[in-house]
Amino acid sequence: MDLTIDLDILDVEPAEEYHAKAHEYLSSHQLRDFVKCPLLHRKKALGLIEDKESAAYLVGRAAHVRILEGRDAYETAFALGGPINPRTNKPFGSNTKAFSEWAQAQGKPVLSQEQVELIEQMASGVAMNSEAVDLLLYGRAEGVVRAEYCGTPCQIRIDWLHPHRGIVDFKTCDDLTWFESDARRFGYQRQTAFYRAVLAQVLDGLIVPVHLVAVEKKEPFRCGVWRVSDDTLAIAQRENEAAIRRLQVCQQRDHWPTGYEEIRVLDVV
């Protein structure tokens, strides 16, 4: 289909500002937590559980910035080398106290030299896939949309929006061979269906295509591209909307079950 999206519908704001509004707007990650366990969702909303950033998550976040937003944004957001050591006229090493103190003063997460090299390898892997390059050639990274969906204020931060090819969600993975099963396990179809449905609220109901771009975090750093089928997204959207209705009931009753209150049957064949 002929598709033209006005990228000016996207708000541009720092990730910290976006996440700070989580108490006002429902996001795909919050809905995922609710589907997994309503009590988990509630405890996170109250600040009783804090997500800690693992080394793997840090690398994934840095790869998003490096590959989607570019080198300048990447070097601005992360501590890669630190200030120059006047004695050697070279950057302080990432494992030195001076570097750590400098990074902390700048408020920047520290990437080790090994992590920096890994991210460059991943960027090279994406660059070797012509389909991925084509999807990421035009568009806007990390655009924000806020709209009411299913009677609930929602927000999305889209990895990449192509004006003619729709939503592109970027993923990092350990092994591309198992990416499709990982996508099912982590519910990527529900996440992107949420993006698509919220975006449709500001596009006069226009339903856009969705692609996934995934790259490995180890040799040979393969990169693959998937188009998420319309049937898969339609089913996922119905699941999301049913979950939002359940969330509204939990909010009204202030009742947050675990989902394991009843005896289940374990049938091992």
Image (cartoon, grey):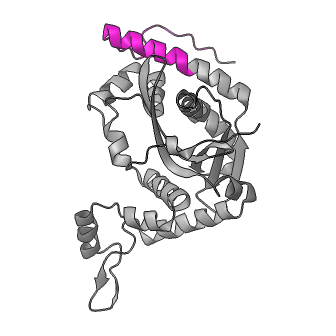
| Residue 257 as seen in the image, left or right of residue 85 | right
Q: Is residue 66 above or below residue 150?
A: below
Q: Is residue 191 visible?
A: yes
| Residue 246 as seen in the image, left or right of residue 140 | left
Q: Residue at x 49, y 45 (%)?
A: 143
Residue 100 in picture, x, y percent from top left: 27, 69
Quadrant of residue 183 within the rendered picture: top right
Please state which of residues 242 and 40 is positioned toward the viewer in this rendering: 242
Q: Residue at x 35, y 33 (%)?
A: 22
Quadrant housing the N terminus? top right
Please state which of residues 2 and 162 is positioned toward the viewer in this rendering: 2
Q: Residue at x 54, y 18 (%)?
A: 241
Residue 102 in picture, x, y percent from top left: 25, 70
Q: Residue at x 31, y 83 (%)?
A: 84
Q: Which residues are magenta?
A: 240-267
Q: Is residue 115 above or below residue 168?
A: below
- How many numbered marks have been drawn onto this rendered protein structure? 0
Residue 11 in picture, x, y percent from top left: 44, 44
Residue 266 painted magenta: yes
Residue 157 in picture, x, y percent from top left: 47, 41
Quadrant of residue 87 within the rendered picture: bottom left
Q: Is residue 49 above or below residue 216?
A: above
